[in-house]
C-alpha cells in the first residue's frame, strides 16, 4: 500500500473565496524596484549634455573687464545676468541677480541670494 492511496483520488476542495483574475495573479510574481529612483538616474545619465567650451583670451579679457566694472560699481547694486557652466547639471545656466561680492582669491562671485559662481565657468555677463 502506497502512502497516498487514501487521498490520491479525492476531489479538490472548494474554496469559499472567488478565483483571482489572471492579471492580478501575474502581478504577484512581477519584479519590484529594489532601487527606487535608479531607473530615473539611468535615463538622466543617458541624456545628451552640454560640454563646457574652452575659454580663449578674448573671452577672458571681456569677462575680466566686466568684473572690474561691477567691482567698481558694487555699491550701485547693478542687476546682472551671468551665463555659466554648471558641472552638477552638465549644462549652461543663466542666473540673474545682484552681485554681493567678487572674491579674487577664491575666484568666485557671490550674488545677494547667496548663489556662488566660479569665475572660470563664466562665459558671459550682461547688465
Image (tube, rainbow, N blue to C red):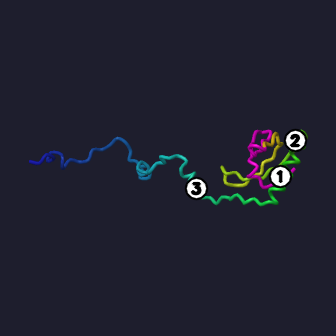
Secondary structure found at label 2: helix
Residue found 88% across the figure and 48% down from its top: 69
Q: Nearer the viewer, residue 108 or 41?
A: 108
Instruction: Determine crowd level at label 3: few under 14, some 14-19, many 20+ residues with C-alpha closer than 10 A.
Output: few
Secondary structure found at label 3: helix
Is there a contact, CB below 8 Å, between mark 3 and mark 1? no
Give the mark nearest the N terminus, 3 or 1.
Answer: 3
Instruction: Determine crowd level at label 2: few under 14, some 14-19, many 20+ residues with C-alpha closer than 10 A.
Output: some
Give the mark nearest the N terminus, 1 or 2.
Answer: 1
Is there a contact, CB below 8 Å, between mark 1 and mark 2? no
Left or right for 83, reference 27: right
Q: Read off the residue under disc 2.
A: 74
Q: Which residues are magenta?
A: 104-127
Please give the label number shown on residue 43. Answer: 3
Direction left: furthest residue: 1
The x and y percentages for residue 52 are: 70, 58
Q: Read off the residue under disc 1.
A: 64
Residue found 49% across the figure and 48% down from its top: 33
Residue found 83% across the figure and 56% down from its top: 61
Mark closer to the observer (3, 1): 1
Q: Is residue 47 magenta?
A: no
Is there a contact, CB below 8 Å, between mark 2 and mark 3? no
The x and y percentages for residue 79 are: 86, 45
Left or right for 44, reference 54: left
Q: Nearer the viewer, residue 40 or 115?
A: 115
- Cα distance, mark 3 to mark 1? 38 Å
- Residue 124 sits in which quadrant? bottom right
Amino acid at each position: 500500500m502506497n502512502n497516498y492511496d487514501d487521498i490520491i483520488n479525492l476531489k479538490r476542495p472548494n474554496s469559499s473565496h472567488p478565483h483571482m483574475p489572471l492579471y492580478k495573479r501575474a502581478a504577484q510574481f512581477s519584479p519590484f524596484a529594489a532601487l527606487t529612483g535608479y531607473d530615473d538616474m539611468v535615463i538622466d545619465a543617458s541624456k545628451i549634455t552640454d560640454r563646457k567650451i574652452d575659454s580663449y583670451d578674448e573671452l577672458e579679457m571681456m569677462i575680466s573687464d566686466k568684473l572690474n566694472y561691477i567691482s567698481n560699481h558694487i555699491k550701485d547694486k547693478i542687476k546682472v545676468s551671468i551665463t555659466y557652466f554648471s558641472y552638477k547639471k552638465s549644462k549652461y545656466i543663466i542666473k540673474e541677480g545682484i552681485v554681493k561680492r567678487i572674491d579674487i582669491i577664491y575666484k568666485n562671485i557671490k550674488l545677494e541670494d547667496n548663489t556662488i559662481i566660479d569665475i572660470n565657468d563664466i562665459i558671459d555677463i550682461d547688465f
